Image (tube, grey):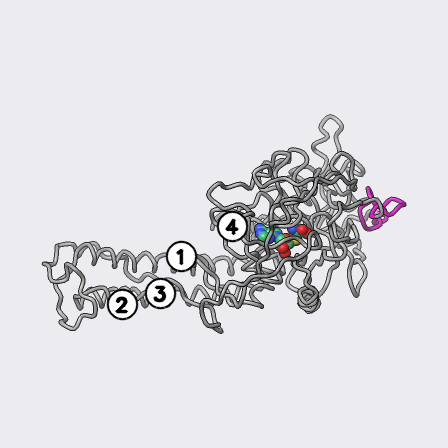
Amino acid sequence: MKKLISTISLKNIIYRFRRTLSSVNLTAKISDRGCKMLHSGEDKSDLVQLPEGVTPFTHITQNEFLGRKHKKLKEEDIAICECKYDDTDPESACGERCLNLLTSTECTPGYCQCSENCRNQRFQKCEYAKTKLFRTEGRGWGLLADEDIKAGQFIIEYCGEVISSEAAKRRSQAYEAHDLKDAYIISLNANYFIDASRKGSFARFINHSCQPNCETRKWTVLGETRVGIFAKQDIPAGMELAYNYNFEWYGGATVRCLCRAANCSIFLGAKSQGFQEYNHVWEDGDDRYEVEEVPLYDSAEDEFFPVISFSGTRGGNEHSKILNDSEVGLSDPAVPSGRDVPQRIGSGSTPKKKSQHIPKRKGKSSSRKQVNDYDFAKMFASQEAREEVTKYEGIKKEATSKLNSVYQEIRPTIEEHGRDNQDSVPTSVAEKWIEANCSKYRADFDLYFSVIKNVMCPRPATDATAAVPSEGGAGPQTANDEAKPSEGGVE
Ligand SMILES: C[S@@+](CC[C@H](N)C(=O)[O-])C[C@H]1O[C@@H](n2cnc3c(N)ncnc32)[C@H](O)[C@@H]1O
């Protein structure tokens, strides 16, 4: 908590400091938008050749806005850092101590004193890691590292068309209606989404994992928010890149997740906006989400996909091939391979197979369900035990519903700032969330403690009508009354 608060204050201090600096009047022009490396003169999107089977899309290296132009950054809004280039220490040019870098803001060309030596224009200069498109088993196309990537490294920007949330909903439904099963819409902020279905960068091929080696981060570049894929850990060449789709991904059709992680949440982007709009989900920790129907596709044809070569945007990383999951770091011998599991296939690659459906397990409910809501009190023969356990069951229910309502309250804020920018969430909101979580954990603990205590040290039954007399229900009460759960779990 302390760390969170100090990060927030640090950010405020840096922000104020930058505002002061930005009043310094520099005269250079703001550079043209876009990735200079790829957009100097010719349209490099023409050069991108895709392997056979990939649904064609337009390759872009900066977002395109529908219904508006790129922002024109006002001079007083330009954040200027303090860095100065020193040729004896090139790393000092907008390195890790750069004020802009620290606040996830790229330096503005013409306004950075390090000029062409500035190292904090990675989105603008398309300083991407080398990656390679490959065919996965059952998850369509994927992107893998084509060089060793360091933890924290910027890998690639997720580019696409920036659209409103209403448009995202409309498009998502239209894509589904047209049977486009791969969904490429992710959230930019509370109101806007990036759709990489028709236009996008190679980031659109990065698949989801519940235990990912990459993450999305939002950066401010020339006044606009942009989404980058960054390495969460060192990634060796040849390993598949993956990030967690929850929060960012708009979702679409309900898709069974095939990431093979031990903590897999079963469905792709189950916490994403699109998923939640289409389905009613169970709480975290439940073994299954309640959904109307789950379309699954057979991946058998994926396995016979030929090795294909193609040339892409940058030298050295432009051929694709089919690799099996163990070759890209996804194998788990405990999990059946694509051959055994009914899975869905990537878009446009192979003819679609007949869809299957998981039968609906329960009636559709209109609200979030409580899980683990077992009435433990019924287990006990003694009146006192039942009363005590009932009391803690009540406290736990209260804490759960408080946590749910806090979640609903803070969700827009969290979604606006994005999962990776939690330090921007107001302290009061963060505190509320942490407090509600602590209360819930404490209430859970108190309830389970009370159950275990009463099972281990049964009290004599005082109520002949006990619903389910426990085995030792009539036994003598042991002297263990001191071992009580903590009082006032949720206060
Ligand atoms: C942003 S696209 C990723 C690229 C996609 N595989 C392709 O071939 O174009 C997202 C789609 O990939 C598939 N996908 C990604 N991760 C997956 C996973 N862990 N399990 C199953 N399908 C996945 C789903 O069809 C999803 O709609």
Q: Earlier in the sequence, mark 1 or mark 3?
A: 3
Between marks 2 and 1, how big is the CA–CA gap? 20 Å
At a point 51% along the width and 60% down the height, the residue shown is: 428
Q: Is residue 401 found left or right of 206 in the rendered image?
A: left
The residue positioned farthest toward the right in the image shown: 41
Q: Nearer the viewer, mark 1 or mark 3?
A: 3
Between marks 1 and 3, how big is the CA–CA gap? 19 Å
* Magenta segment, prevailing SS (helix, strand or loop): loop
Badge 1 crowding class, 10 Å Cα cut-off, few under 14, some 14 to 19, many 20 or more, is some
Q: Which residues are magenta?
A: 27-45
Residue 58 screen position, x and y as percent: 79, 53
Where 344 falls versus 107 (above or below)? below
Q: Earlier in the sequence, mark 4 or mark 2?
A: 4
Q: Nearer the viewer, mark 2 or mark 1?
A: 2
Question: Is any part of residue 197 visible from this angle?
Answer: yes
Between marks 1 and 4, how big is the CA–CA gap? 16 Å
Residue 44 screen position, x and y as percent: 84, 45
Between marks 3 and 2, how big is the CA–CA gap? 12 Å
* Tag 1 secondary structure: helix
* CB-based contact (under 8 Å), mark 2 and mark 1: no
Q: Earlier in the sequence, mark 3 or mark 2?
A: 3
The residue positioned farthest toward the left in the image shown: 476
Between marks 4 and 3, how big is the CA–CA gap? 33 Å
The type of residue carrying mark 3 is Asp
The residue under label 2 is 390
Q: Earlier in the sequence, mark 1 or mark 4?
A: 4
The residue under label 1 is 438
The residue under label 3 is 373
The type of residue carrying mark 1 is Cys
The residue under label 4 is 4
